Amino acid sequence: LAVEQLSPEQHMLRDTARSLLETECPSELVRSCLDTGRMARGLWEKLGRAGLLGIGLPEAIGGSGGTVIEFVIAAGEFGRALAPVPWFGTALASRLALIAPGLDTDAVGAALQGRSVLSVAIPDLWWNPLLAPQAEVTPEQLTVPWGAEADHIVGLGGTAVQPIVSLDSKPYQGLEIREYPALGTDSYSWAQRTAQPAGAVPVDPDAVRTVLTEMRVARCAEMMAGARRVLEIAVDYAKERRQFGRPIGSFQAVKHRLADMATDVELADLLVWEAARAVATGDGSAWEEAAMAKALSGEAYRRVAAGACQVLGGYGFMLEYDPQLYFRRAKQAQLLEGSSEDLYVAIGSRAVGYASS
Amino acid sequence: VSGSSRTPDVGAFRERARSFFARAVTPEVRRELRDRRDEHVPSFFSRMANEGWISMPWPERYGGGGASAVENAIFQEEAAFAGAPTLAANLNSIIGNTLITVGSESLKRSFVGGLAAGEHLFCLGYTEPEAGSDLAALRTRAVLDGDEYLVNGAKIFTSLAHVATHVFLAARTEANGERHAGLSVLIVDMDSPGITIDPVWTLGGFRTNMTFYDNVRVPADRIVMGPGQGWKVLKVALDFERSGTLRVGEAARLLELIRSEVGKRESSPPGSVEARRYGALATRTRAARALCYKVARMQASGIVPHMEASMAKVVGTELVQSIADAGLDLLGQSALASAGSPWAPADGELEAEYRNTVRFSVTAGTNEIQRNIIAERGLGLPRD
């Protein structure tokens, strides 16, 4: 499956999401959320009402139905618009809650309709394919997406062979959340877990892996759509901007950089769609394909965003212009859910016979 | 090389190609390839012809196998993965397809059958010392004299000229024609009086040639498409030359060599540094492969993939260079040893490829020209 093989319905979903976000999420909104550190509440409610938050989740619990492919399409549109809303944390929390038998899913339905916010407390190690099966994954420090905005937090803990999932509501017990300024456009809180929440339930490790893989692919789709958008900004600028009496896009130094940026996007995007297909068909290689896609698309997004900042010259680092927003977001997304560096080590480790201790 | 071919027919084709190379690339073929140092093994070339691989991508009504662009991409990938010497067969295949597409009935009758059977062996006479990327600046002249052309000039990088029966020669026929408008393509017998061939040795250890044309007489009906049509002919031929999977197959082969040699490394066990470098290159190889098959799918559905083919060329060629470089870095000093040295890992193959891969970002359209194409045709940036 490649993007050119989407069905008419899938194209329609993309167009609908894009036009809603173009109207409701201009870059001024992203910029003001970055200033205040607060999510865009009004946008969140509109996305919920439009059914864009529950894509890929069953209607019975308040989702909008559809497969991972539709979910990936929606994620791309959030990424293109840099939507300053907790779509990722809510989607991940919902999926974890659904695989935890006996966990109350009422909170999920409300969040998917934009009436509340879910977040997750997941030690970063869970995203590393080299995670040792028996290691207890309970570090003290956690990053929680839009943590200060969340009404409920789903936690993932235990070990890789016996994971546990919990659902915590405000005021949280054993989880202390603090906010600090940081690089990215999405707000991430620092949290400290001092005790496991009551009512944590054991979950199937394979189901956890499937959820994490699906979310990783969604993150990839978000990144590649952001990369495409910031590439468009740079190409348009290079056609318009004149220096030395001609458009700067006619100079080979600029042209070749843009050609490399376009190639980065094309290459990584192909891996992302391959990984999405693997997830959709339940392919056994999905975990590895998603890891490769995440590593490469993180690298591509960063390079393309940095390239756009360079092509726009002085406008590339002015807060009033958009490339800086993508530059921030690219690095943030590259490091979340397994950095390119960690994933490359994991991908190569089996081939060269390296085992982390 | 695995995966990607998800439809059964394409999978069967891959099996056929793989089993052919497993049988045909014998230790003797490898030895001869190394000893001859000209990218050509005559017995292997004949075998490809006899088993129908040269005409495999041609239409069936010309005796071809009717293989699709995707199947051709698979074939090239498997050839490279096996390290097969397919240069001569590929040139014949491209010329045959070009003649089938734009050649006269008489040229088709004279050459198509012989190209498929390996009775002819064609080399390409395009590049000149003063006309590389700017091919339209070429100076070799072909002047009509009765019913013959009189050819004078010099060509460089005429690979296989010393074993070829014919050269597919680009020359200027219209003295006052504009750069592109004055070009024509002629089919010239290599044993014509007035042709001399000088070897040129390259960094990769392979021979190519300079060829000189001194009042060489060529029958006028050996012109392809007619006088002044040369640029069109070259574009048709170049479009058949655009399979990026050769480099991807080679990347996979080199990664496999590195993987097996790093495992034998005694001085220090591989760590996260090695894993990181290998993991990044394996990832990029997978992405490059996806891009090449996208190009092939576009070709198969009748779309000319200008931007994507140029991207595949840049990515594939720079990828094999990075992999060869990584191979030497990861294996350390011992990897400096060339073939024949008792210390050479993989019998010097990585060292040889480190030298050989340098040319790929230059040949078949430099990567700078490819980046111009991506920027201008793909992104719509203004020409300079």
Image: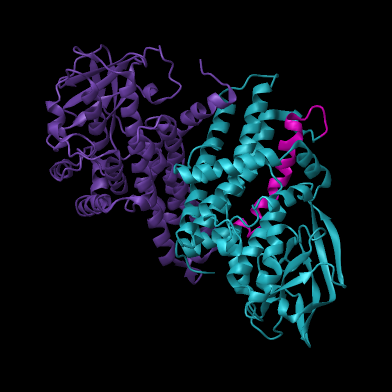
Chain colours: A purple, B cyan
Say which residue appears at 13% left-offset and 32% top-offset. Answer: A60
- Regarding residue B203, the answer to whether it shows in the image is no
Q: Picture coordinates of residue A245 (x, y %)?
A: 49, 72
Could you tell me what secondary structure mostly forms the magenta stretch?
A: helix
Between A110 and A175, the one nearer to me in the picture: A110
- Regarding residue B293, the answer to whether it shows in the image is yes
The part of the chain drawn in magenta is B340-367
Say which residue appears at 53% left-offset and 18% top-offset. Answer: A355
Q: Picture coordinates of residue B103 (x, y %)?
A: 63, 73
User: In the rendered view, would you say B329 is above or below B312?
Assistant: above
Q: Picture coordinates of residue A69 (x, y %)?
A: 30, 42
Residue B56 image-quadrant placement: bottom right
Q: In which quadrant will I find the N terminus of chain B?
A: top right
Between B114 and A101, the one nearer to me in the picture: B114
Residue B134 image-quadrant placement: bottom right
* Left or right: A134 as drawn, with respect to B153: left
B309 magenta-colored: no
Say which residue appears at 57% left-offset and 64% top-offset. Answer: B61
Q: In which quadrant will I find the C terminus of chain B?
A: bottom right
